[in-house]
Amino acid sequence: MNSMKLDYDITTEEMELIEKHLVNELTPDQALLFDQKSKNDPDWPKKIEEMRLLMLGVQESSLRNMFSEYHKKEVPAQTSTRLKSIPAAKRWLIAASVFIVFSIAAWLLIFRNDEDRSLYAKYYRPDPGLLTAMGPASNYLFEKGMVEYKNEEYEKALSTWAGFARTATAGDTLHFFMAMANQALGRLDSAKSLLAGITADSGRPFYQEACWYYGLILLKEGQKSEASNYIERSEHPGKAELLKEIKSN
Amino acid sequence: MQQARSTNLSLHNILSAIKANDEAVIRQLYADNYPAIAQFVTKNNGTSDDAQDIYQEAFLALWRNIQLNKFQASEPSAISAYLYQVARNKWIDQLRSRKTKPMVALVDERMGEIPEDGVSQDTHQYLDAVKNGFSSLGSKCRDLLNRFYYQKQSLREIASELNWTEPTAKNNKYRCLQELRTLVKTKVQK
């Protein structure tokens, strides 16, 4: 790393000035000062570039630090199990043992409902939520709840949305995400009743998504045929695979 | 109330969401693309830990290129293709350095070079030095900088959550940034 020469100082005041410039938040006085620096400080362009990279590097470091949590929460359990490090020589032996154990287990699976529940666990993933951009005041409560929802603070989101649900602008979007929060909390009856309205009309926003989650709940309840009907109407990427599995169960 | 979905987004929207560090989109991309790469690494003498490390390196490379406006693509599937290609090439390089023979056939070994990103070596070096320096910072500084620059919390929010005044939050932020810069200078000018 000999080619980079950082042989200048960046004062705290300069850092603030450059930072405001990079996010377009310079006041008129600061803009004047910034122009003066541009004219008089030969290192100014280097300082701007360095601050830009410093801010970016901090964000990259933060993202890297979040990976372990992402990995734990987002990577499906079956992938992690499947990928445990096993010496190559033992793989066939383990695979054979696993096969035998699963064959015996299959005989023991008397209650079909267990299979349906496990299919639910395999295919159910909470909806990732919407992009949030803290917009106009009318949407503030919805956006706030969405941030909480995306942070998996489902109770908090529901209580934020409870106030908003009574306003005139509440609609299918809100009902859908209230259903999602309830479903994530395991309150399937509440989720079902919220989703039922949306699945009744194919022209409504979130119709496809609502059909998928409604179908999953029915599946968990053991209503396979009804569940298939709803899942069929969704456009979820896992739809074909799930329908196949329901059929073969 | 029309909202942009975080799933089924256009390439433009995905790139904007990544630039804004939208957590839901990043999490989903992370989850969607991991299995293919994990399968490749574990079929080629790698463990799940290797797969995770390689994947995270590739993911950071993608994120960095997007932030620097150097990621060129015309459709969303290019993101998955890029991640796979970067991870695959990185893993093959590691196998070579370990002098380990791959277990499954690697079609034409490296799948072609990763497209030139147009980012200078100096830029990569500086950003890597920031990452190194960041991990050497104290936990309070890491938390503060993470809140401000990654989570985009305002100084007012940070001050309120950490029981500081707003000027204290501001002073602490720049103190931490100066501390980080000193660490970076040491690493870059070694």
Image (cartoon, rainbow, N blue to C red):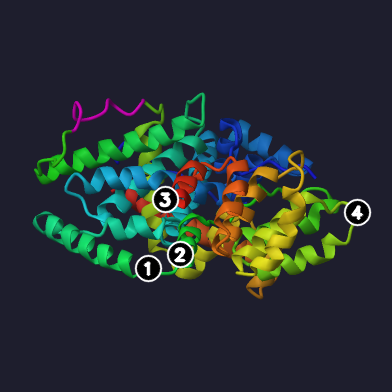
Badge 1: residue crowd in 10 Å (few <14, some 14–19, many ≥20): few
The residue lying at 19 percent from left, 33 percent from top is B106
Which tag, 2 or 3, sits closer to the chain's start?
Answer: 2
Which tag, 1 or 3, sits closer to the chain's start?
Answer: 1
Marks 2 and 4 sit apart, C-alpha to C-alpha, by: 44 Å
Give the magenta-colored segment's residue range.
Answer: B106-115
- Tell me: B59 left or right of A164: left
**The disc labelled 2 sits on which kind of residue?**
Arg
- Disc sitting over residue A122 in the figure: none
**The disc labelled 3 sits on which kind of residue?**
Ser
Marks 4 and 1 sit apart, C-alpha to C-alpha, by: 50 Å
The percent coordinates of residue B26 (x first, y second) are 52, 48
Vertical arrangement, residue B79 with respect to residue A236, above or below = above
Vertical arrangement, residue B117 with respect to residue B44, above or below = above
Quarter of the image for residue B81 reads top left
> Label 2's element?
helix
Camera-nearest label, 4 or 1: 1
Marks 1 and 2 sit apart, C-alpha to C-alpha, by: 7 Å
- Disc sitting over residue A248 in the figure: 3
Res. A14 visible in picture:
no
- Residues at discs 2 and 4 both on one chain: yes
Marks 4 and 3 sit apart, C-alpha to C-alpha, by: 46 Å
Q: Which residue is mark 1?
A: A109
- Residues at discs 4 and 1 both on one chain: yes
The percent coordinates of residue B48 (x first, y second) are 27, 55
